[in-house]
């Protein structure tokens, strides 16, 4: 391992490499550490390498550390090198060429843990802007509220926190200057008594390991992480899934995330919840990260974990689901919520940012005045500042005034902004000094007086983080399903007679996906004839569909309706019905029985595997019926005193096997005769009519229905007033 391998790596990667080198504890590792300590541009990397060199304790390092003591631009690094060289000169011993022991490794790890804690505590102020977003989207990535209604934006919450990371020293007179305050709304935290005024945040003091914060809100539009998920049929991957109840159906779930932010997203976690216990998941595949099945308090889910998505990148994942829907019911397949959490680091979405922050802690500053031995009245002066706190300090400016401050006579000035950051940094326990100067005082009783101005602050770490949670609410997958029913009317037909039977089919959509293609295939009962095209009715809510294909062949009637979405008829939506009816014809033998079936096929465009449903109608039974009707008349004279009164009996008998409807019996009352009373019918007659004609009176009776072996009868009396010849009357009445 060499420095050149890590020259373009991040700071953390370099420090990790240094720790690995230290644990190797051999000459090659020591030489590599020399390169890190001498060449790297980052003072923290150089300091870490110096610490590791000192831990290895090889006398060969003394000359390198002395070189660093003279040449390094960072005072802290120079001081570390100086102390390390002195220590190794006293206690050093040469490294071996081989591996180090487990005991050495454990000691090195302990040294690093101590070093890490020390470095962590040096930056005394920790300022963090933490923002939180919780929002919901629809499948088109529009922001929605709890009811699913689209909204224009959402409110995020956040807090601005300032913490003292030290373990023993207070930090006081803390002042923070902010940027982007117009984009947020601050609220005073009553418990902590903190608030932002204008663009400033001020605190009197912070105890060790304590923090204070002020909350705020901000308004944002839809966050720029787009989520696209789809379900595809396994047999045809560009089509939505189809489910056959009671049978296992396969579908492929695909999930795509696109980071449309101008910065990376980290710690991305996607949970796709599965509500149906009858779903098995497998064949996981992801372009990045880890994808598997998991569960939590909210249920079983597909878990996708991604460390980072770069700005502008799209990542994808997929798996296969095997679903078995229950045989009963029309409920669609429900998909659970998709919950996505992610972080945005080193950036706020609100626009809030930190300009500067300053704070004071324990330092000791003094100016020494030493009168020269051989030149009384000449004083050698020196300004020194010792960092007695546990924190690293940032010295931005020093001004030494000769005499009082208000005279403005600057004797010595040091402007930190003209120096690299390393030169401005004062480590805990380190002493900073300015170049000495000499001043002459004529009066033996006067010692030089100086005023001073310092711009000195505890160093700080600034961090920003957004923690977001996005929920895509669950939904029902597009589900295509149909039901079909079939009837025949009548269900009894006579034998040896060509008879019309009405065949009727009702197709109902029971799924959420509209049906744009429909085909009905009726297998006609054996020996039946199909209809002509103009006899077919296709109705939806009473409206007739004219545009359909029709074919009758090989004992089948096939009616095909294509691209219903392009017709005024429209597609078949959920719970809508289509009625199809037409006549079919039979000439059957006695005692035959017939059933018929229809198969309905439904589909959508682009065409997918069609769904189907079947129904059966019947049986149609054949009744051998023949009509045989006997009608007679009997006339007899009565015993009435008048010799011209007669009783007439009209009788009909159904001696056949068929019901005879509307049996009509008529008689004629000659001129000169009249009814002697009311007529009597058995059973009750459906219709009776008497009408006058030229030669007498016509009489008609109609019985609506006469069953086989049933007898109907009409009785009435007539008389002929005046003289008459009985023989002639009898002949006339029997006619």
Image: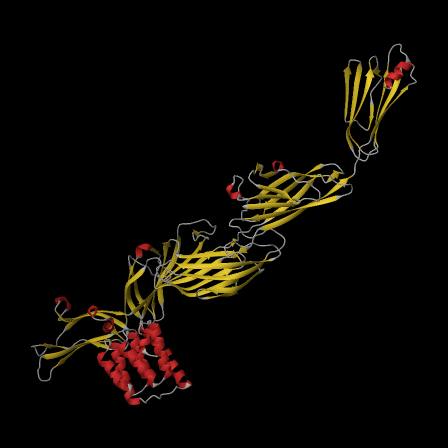
Q: Is residue 120 above or below residue 228?
A: below
Residue 488 spot, x, y in % from top left: 69, 41
In this rendered view, identify the residue nearer to me: 36 or 577.
577
Q: Is residue 137 visible?
A: yes
Residue 312 spot, x, y in % from top left: 37, 60
Q: Is residue 488 above or below residue 329?
A: above
Q: Across the whole image, how many numbered discs are drawn on residues?
A: 0
* Lateral position of residue 563 relative to residue 98, left or right: right
**Residue sitting at x 32%, y 86%:** 57
In this rendered view, identify the residue nearer to me: 267 or 477.
477
Residue 11 spot, x, y in % from top left: 33, 72
**Residue sitting at x 59%, y 45%:** 519
**Residue that lies at the very extreme toward the left in this rendered image:** 442
Residue 630 spot, x, y in % from top left: 84, 28
* Lateral position of residue 150 relative to residue 18, left or right: right
Q: Is residue 96 above or below residue 293?
A: below
Quarter of the rendering occupied by the C terminus: top right
**Residue that lies at the very extreme toward the front in this rendered image:** 554
In this rendered view, identify the residue nearer to me: 222 or 38.
38
Q: Is residue 389 visible?
A: no
**Residue sitting at x 76%, y 43%:** 592
**Residue that lies at the very extreme toward the top in this rendered image:** 723
In this rendered view, identify the residue nearer to me: 570 or 562.
562
Query: Which quadrant holds residue 489?
Result: top right
């Amino acid at each position: 391992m060499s420095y050149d391998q890590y020259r373009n790596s991040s700071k953390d990667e370099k420090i990790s490499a240094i720790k690995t080198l230290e644990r190797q504890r051999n000459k090659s590792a020591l030489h590599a550490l020399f390169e890190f300590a001498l060449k790297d541009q980052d003072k923290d990397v150089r300091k870490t390498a110096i610490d590791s060199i000192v831990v290895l304790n090889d006398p060969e390092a003394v000359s390198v550390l002395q070189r660093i003591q003279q040449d390094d631009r960072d005072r802290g690094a120079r001081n570390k090198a100086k102390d390390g060289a002195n220590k190794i000169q006293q206690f050093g011993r040469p490294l071996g060429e081989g591996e180090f022991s487990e005991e050495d490794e454990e000691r090195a790890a302990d040294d690093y843990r101590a070093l890490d804690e020390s470095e962590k505590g040096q930056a005394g102020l920790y300022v963090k802007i933490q923002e939180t977003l919780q929002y919901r989207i629809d499948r088109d990535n529009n922001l929605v509220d709890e009811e699913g209604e689209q909204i224009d934006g959402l409110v995020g919450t956040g807090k601005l926190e300032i913490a003292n990371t030290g373990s023993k020293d207070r930090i006081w007179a803390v002042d923070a200057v902010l940027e982007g305050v117009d984009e947020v709304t601050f609220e005073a935290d009553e418990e902590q008594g903190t608030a932002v005024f204008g663009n400033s945040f001020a605190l009197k003091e912070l105890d060790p390991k304590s923090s204070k914060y002020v909350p705020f809100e901000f308004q944002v539009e839809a966050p720029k992480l787009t989520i696209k998920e789809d379900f595809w049929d396994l047999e045809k991957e560009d089509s939505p899934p189809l489910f056959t109840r009671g049978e296992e159906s396969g579908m492929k779930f695909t999930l795509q995330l696109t980071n449309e932010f101008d910065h990376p997203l980290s710690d991305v976690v996607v949970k796709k919840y599965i509500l149906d216990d009858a779903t098995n998941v497998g064949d996981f595949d992801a372009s990045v990260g880890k994808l598997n099945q998991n569960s939590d308090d909210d249920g079983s889910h597909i878990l996708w974990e991604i460390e980072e998505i770069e700005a502008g990148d799209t990542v994808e994942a997929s798996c296969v689901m095997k679903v078995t829907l229950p045989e009963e019911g029309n409920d669609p397949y429900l998909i659970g919520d998709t919950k996505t959490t992610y972080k945005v680091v080193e950036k706020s979405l609100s626009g809030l940012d930190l300009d500067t922050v300053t704070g004071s802690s324990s330092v000791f500053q003094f100016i020494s005045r030493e009168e020269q031995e051989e030149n009384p009245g000449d004083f050698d002066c020196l300004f020194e500042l010792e960092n007695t706190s546990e924190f690293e300090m940032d010295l931005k400016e020093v001004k030494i005034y000769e005499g009082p401050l208000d005279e403005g006579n600057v004797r010595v000035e040091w402007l930190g902004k003209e120096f690299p950051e390393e030169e401005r940094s004062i480590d805990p326990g380190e002493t900073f000094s300015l170049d000495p100067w000499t001043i002459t005082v004529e009066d033996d009783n006067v010692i030089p007086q100086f005023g001073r101005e310092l711009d000195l602050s505890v160093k700080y770490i600034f961090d920003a983080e957004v923690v977001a949670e996005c929920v895509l609410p669950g939904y029902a997958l597009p589900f295509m399903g149909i039901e079909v029913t079939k009837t025949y009317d009548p269900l009894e037909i006579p034998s040896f007679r060509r008879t019309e039977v009405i065949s009727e089919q009702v197709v109902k959509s029971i799924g959420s996906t509209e049906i744009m293609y429909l085909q009905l295939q009726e297998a006609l009962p054996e020996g039946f004839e199909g209809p002509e095209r103009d006899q077919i009715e296709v109705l939806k809510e009473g409206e007739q569909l004219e545009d359909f294909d029709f074919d009758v062949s090989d004992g089948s009637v096939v009616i095909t309706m294509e691209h219903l979405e392009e017709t005024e008829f429209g597609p078949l939506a959920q719970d809508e019905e289509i009625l199809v009816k037409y006549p079919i014809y039979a000439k059957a033998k006695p005692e035959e029985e017939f059933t018929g079936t229809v198969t309905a096929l439904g589909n959508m465009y682009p065409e997918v595997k069609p769904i189907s449903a079947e129904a059966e109608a019947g049986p149609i039974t054949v009744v051998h019926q023949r009509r045989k009707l006997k009608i007679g008349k009997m006339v007899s004279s009565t015993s009435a005193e008048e010799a011209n009164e007669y009783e007439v009996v009209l009788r009909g008998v159904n001696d056949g096997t068929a019901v005879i409807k509307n049996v009509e019996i008529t008689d004629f009352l000659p001129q000169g005769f009249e009814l002697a009373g009311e007529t009597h019918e058995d059973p009750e007659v459906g219709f009776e009519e008497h009408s006058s004609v030229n030669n007498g009176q016509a009489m008609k009776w109609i019985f609506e229905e006469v069953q086989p072996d049933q007898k109907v009868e009409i009785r009435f009396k007539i008389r002929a007033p005046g003289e008459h010849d009985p023989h002639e009357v009898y002949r006339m009445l029997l006619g």
